[in-house]
């Protein structure tokens, strides 16, 4: 809200009688504060009522190590997710039966969600991660997702070509979990893990049909880290994975002729 109001931190701190250090720590989340002070800050930055109500509702939430946000209509449009992806240093993502969201084409995403605007928001997330200062991103793709036909052979061919192309992107690693991989509990549920520069704690999240559950509890993060390590032991090499994507692209191309 301060950036939207085009006010510098010095201007806001002076207007509120705060030190620059207090405002900086509040904005980075490295210090606590009261709902009254947050309301004062929002008012000084000219926040509208809807924004004030939303931020203050978040401010009084108990810190239980997790929080839930309803998908409206999907996680792709959640501000909490966008802000964390913008700030992430690393991203690791896995989905068991479909190509992970961060690697989907717009057509593939549209078939899955039934909403072209959601698909565009998903594509925008990918573009954000691909920026020069974007995070190191690792995407685990189960081979079952390559076999499951979404939207027909053309959609699948284009999706496989996209995966093959993404293997050449800087800061991106796409790794295939082969069908022949040993069964492991890590394969069962989707998960995404993000890490950040200090002092921000790692964050994990899982999307359900109606809500996205975020976790920053250290014990839960440890479980997600173990899951990612397990997945990393099951995957093919980067070069082998690229060959698998290219082979499936060729297979779907031949089916569509």
Image (cartoon, helix red, strand yellow):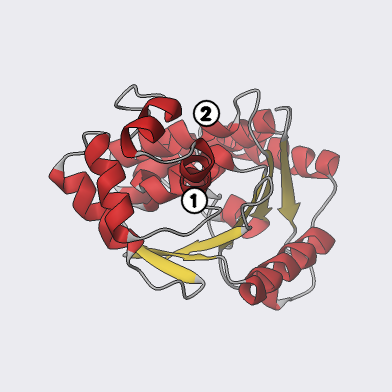
Q: Is residue 257 visible?
A: no
Q: Are marks 1 and 2 in contact (CB under 8 Å)?
A: no
Label 1 CA crowd tier, 10 Å (few <14, some 14–19, many 20+): some
Report the quarter where the N terminus lies.
Answer: top left
Q: From the viewer's side, name the closer residue of 203 and 28.
A: 28
- The spot of residue 118 in percent (x, y) is 33, 41
Q: Determine the residue located farthest toward the front in the rendered image.
A: 17
Above or below: residue 126 compared with residue 50: above
Describe residue 5's horizontal placement relative to residue 148 as left or right.
Answer: left
Above or below: residue 183 compared with residue 71: below
Residue at point 27%, 57% (across, down): 36
Q: In terms of secondary structure, where does tag 2 sit?
A: helix
Task: Report which residue position mark 1 lands on.
Answer: 149
Above or below: residue 82 compared with residue 45: below
Above or below: residue 36 compared with residue 155: below
Q: In terms of secondary structure, where does tag 1 sit?
A: loop
Q: Is residue 89 visible?
A: yes
- The spot of residue 111 in percent (x, y) is 36, 45
Mark sitting on residue 127:
2
Q: Between disc 1 and disc 2, whose residue precedes?
A: 2
Residue at point 79%, 59% (across, down): 232
Residue at point 84%, 39% (across, down): 239
- The spot of residue 109 in percent (x, y) is 41, 43
């Amino acid at each position: 809200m301060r950036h939207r109001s085009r006010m510098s931190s010095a201007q806001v701190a002076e207007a509120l009688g705060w030190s620059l250090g207090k405002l900086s720590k509040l904005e980075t989340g490295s210090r606590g504060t009261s709902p009254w002070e947050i309301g004062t800050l929002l008012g000084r930055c000219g926040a509208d009522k809807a924004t004030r109500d939303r931020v203050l509702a978040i401010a009084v939430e108990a810190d239980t190590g997790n929080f839930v946000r309803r998908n409206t209509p999907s996680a792709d449009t959640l501000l909490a997710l966008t802000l964390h992806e913008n700030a992430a240093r690393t991203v690791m993502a896995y989905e068991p039966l479909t190509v992970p969201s961060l690697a989907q084409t717009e057509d593939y995403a549209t078939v899955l969600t039934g909403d072209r605007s959601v698909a565009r928001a998903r594509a925008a997330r990918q573009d954000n991660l691909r920026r020069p200062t974007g995070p190191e991103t690792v995407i685990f793709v189960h081979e079952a997702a390559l076999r499951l036909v979404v939207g027909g052979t053309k959609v699948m061919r284009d999706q496989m070509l996209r995966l093959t192309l993404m293997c050449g992107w800087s800061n991106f690693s796409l790794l295939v979990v082969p069908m022949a991989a040993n069964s492991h509990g890590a394969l069962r549920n989707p998960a995404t893990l993000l890490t950040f520069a200090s002092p921000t704690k790692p964050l994990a999240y899982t999307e359900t049909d109606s809500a996205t559950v975020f976790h920053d509890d250290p014990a839960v993060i440890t479980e997600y880290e173990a899951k990612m390590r397990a997945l990393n032991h099951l995957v093919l090499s980067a070069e082998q994975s690229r060959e698998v994507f290219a082979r499936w692209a060729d297979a779907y191309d031949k089916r569509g002729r």
